[in-house]
Amino acid sequence: MSEKLYNVYSEYLKDKYGVKVYKLPIKLPLTCPNRDGNLSKGGCTFCGEEGGSFENLSSCTPIRDQLRTNMDYIRKKYKAEKFIAYFQNFSNTYMPFEDFKRHISDAIIEDIVEISISTRPDCISDKYLQFLSDIQYNKGINVTIELGLQTVNYHSLKKINRGHSLAEFIESAVGIKSHGLRLCTHVILNLPWDDMDDVMETAKVLSALKVDEVKMHSLYLMEGTTLAHQFKKGEFQLFSKDEYIQRVITFLEYLNPEIVIQRLIGRAPEEGSIFVNWNESWWKIRDDILGKMEQSNSFQGKRFNYLGGKALRNF
Ligand code: SF4
């Protein structure tokens, strides 16, 4: 069912590599310029202590040991044959260049076919991109950069204290693409200050920038974060599950159908959280999204008709 409705990541990987491919998280002892005082000390208002990951081994474990331990487990459990080394938590390019080179090189081991690096749009420069481009060319390992953006509404970016605006994302997206690397972008479609126009515009901007992959998350509230504090003070209200589902569907309809979707909804630890996915499992909400799409004859790219000189078509 889902193959017809949207461009599913697992299918894309199977087609590309010919076998089952699985992402293996790597955790490094890092921080982020939005938390260490470089840009701010508070971080994004939704960011918990783990900086975006919660299922990993200790950051003190050497990279190759993290990969091999996870590889053995995933190989047995899911019958995966090839793997993606995923530098997941915090900002994985926020470190001296020599350290970065060493970490990336350490991840190139047997059965790794791709390296995926999660970071911020303002933590990428040509030097880092050129190194990754050389790795891709010389070692035959594909490289994907995952950038957090969340929304194209720069007023909302300010409200969640991202520490960058839309411009930094555009600059790094253009740089990543011009170096021949793949770009995945993370979005949160139900930020309390965004409306449906913001959802549509986010899909349109990502399509126009030729983003390759998208990962969607629903907003969650972790105890101790600024966002949780604001919520408890009644400064905003959360959207309903039905509203989230409608936003995902609208986003997909405006998105280029060639963009690969890594996730329709995120996961977060229940421990330490005050709100996650309306207390439902992520896969149940994913099934609800797909059911609603089928019912309404919706599919990814249904409204992708706005690029390539649209107005000229009226002659
Ligand atoms: S950029 Fe990422 S790691 Fe840094 S504060 Fe925001 S969510 Fe947390």
Image (spheres, grey):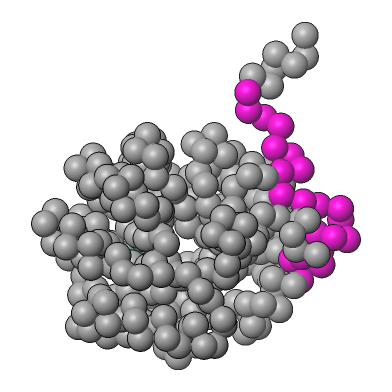
Find residue 125 and report its horizontal and vertical position in percent: 23, 43
Residue located at (37% from left, 55% from top): 141
Q: Is residue 307 magenta?
A: yes
**Quadrant in the picture for residue 240:** bottom right
Find residue 293 and report its horizontal and vertical position in percent: 80, 59
Most distant residue in the bottom direction: 271
- Establish if 240 lies above or below 16: below
Q: Quadrant of the N terminus?
A: bottom right
Query: How many labels were placed on the picture?
Result: 0
Q: Is residue 289 magenta?
A: yes
Q: Quadrant of the C terminus?
A: top right
Task: Please tell me whether the stretch drawn in magenta is mainly helix, strand or loop.
Answer: loop
Q: Which residues are magenta?
A: 288-308
Residue located at (49% from left, 79% from top): 268
Whether residue 224 sits left or right of residue 7 in the image: it is left
Rendered-image quarter of ligand 1: bottom left
Whether residue 271 sits left or right of residue 62 in the image: it is right
Does any portion of residue 6 appear in the rendered image?
yes
The front one of 218 and 77 is 77
The front one of 61 and 185 is 61
Find residue 285 and report its horizontal and vertical position in percent: 69, 74
Find residue 182 and report its horizontal and vertical position in percent: 44, 47
Does any portion of residue 191 appear in the rendered image?
no
Residue located at (34% from left, 81% from top): 68
**Quadrant in the picture for residue 39:** bottom left
- Establish if 312 lies above or below 7: above
Residue located at (23% from left, 68% from top): 106
